[in-house]
Amino acid sequence: MKKNIHPTYHKIKVIMTNGESFEVGSTYGKPGSELVLDIDPSCHPAWTGAHRMAPKGRGVEFENRFKGLSNFKVTKSL
């Protein structure tokens, strides 16, 4: 391996939106840096299960436009 091309691995402090913090090993910043996250498991829908589905979107438009094609039979072409 080449020397002096890899970032340094050190401890940083991660601070979540609810105020919780913990130390973790990372290559982010410098030793002792603080990383403030915009999301955390207590409020983000990915962890709370409060996903919201968009009522209109590209997928819904596609389904509405082509919903009658499910009965379409493909025949062999010559």
Image: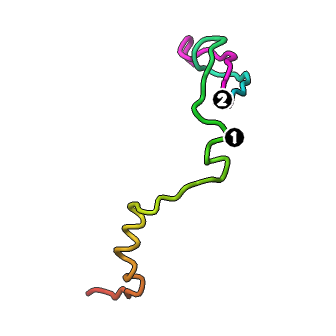
**Does 3 appear above or below 68?**
above
* Residue in the image at 57% along x and 15% along y: 29
Q: What residue type is labelled 1?
A: Ser
* Residue in the image at 66% along x and 24% along y: 15
In-front residue for pair 55/30: 55
Q: Do the residues labelled 2 and 1 touch (CB within 8 Å)?
A: yes
Q: Where is residue 70 in the image (x, y as percent from the top left)?
A: 42, 82
Residue range corresponding to the magenta coloring: 1-18
Q: Is residue 34 magenta?
A: no
Q: Which residue lies furthest to the left in this view?
A: 78
**Does 77 appear above or below 51?**
below
The answer to which image quadrant residue 76 occupies is: bottom left
Q: What residue type is labelled 2?
A: Met
Q: How far apart are marks 2 and 1 (CA)?
A: 10 Å
Q: Name the residue under label 2.
A: 16
* Residue in the image at 37% along x and 68% along y: 62
Q: Name the residue under label 1.
A: 42
Q: Which of marks 2 and 1 is nearer the N terminus?
A: 2
Q: Where is residue 47 in the image (x, y as percent from the top left)?
A: 66, 47
